[in-house]
Image (cartoon, helix red, strand yellow):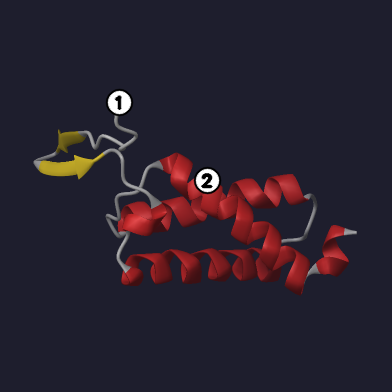
Amino acid sequence: MSSKKKNKHVRVNGRLLNMGKGWKDLKSKQRDFIAKSLISNIENFLNENEFKSIKSMKKQVYQATWDNIEEREIWIPEHEFKHYFGKRFSKYMRKHHSDLIS
């Protein structure tokens, strides 16, 4: 048996989407947009809202960033974005806002 990943394509609203797409399959412009959007949403949240809990902040930042991705019509499976979000959110918070976490 071959260990190659089979790509499934599905037509949605007249567009052919690759359901096996991963983070590495995005164009660099798309990856950069998502990274900048994530950081800007974190910073906006911290500037505009009173920090209550990391869990509620994560939910709101996640949703705002996912909305930006959908507005831009970037197709990536949500589980791929969740994985990226989890790594980057934690890294950003440890680096820049360690005083909030403790």
Instruction: Give the tally of numbered discs.
Output: 2
* Residue depicted at 48% across the width and 71% down the height: 36
Residue 82 in the image: state x and y as whole percent: 52, 46
* Residue depicted at 40% across the width and 65% down the height: 31
Which class describes the residues within 10 Å of circle 2: few (<14), some (14-19), or many (20+)?
few
Q: In this view, which residue lies farthest toward the left?
A: 14
Q: In this view, which residue lies farthest toward the right?
A: 102
Closer to us: 69 or 6: 6
Closer to us: 6 or 51: 6
Q: Quadrant of the C terminus?
A: bottom right
Q: Which mark is residue 41?
A: none
* Residue depicted at 44% across the width and 64% down the height: 34
Q: Can you identify the residue that label 1 sits on?
A: 1
Which class describes the residues within 10 Å of circle 1: few (<14), some (14-19), or many (20+)?
few
Left or right placement of residue 40 versus residue 11 in this view: right
Q: Can you identify the residue that label 2 sits on?
A: 82
Q: Quadrant of the N terminus?
A: top left
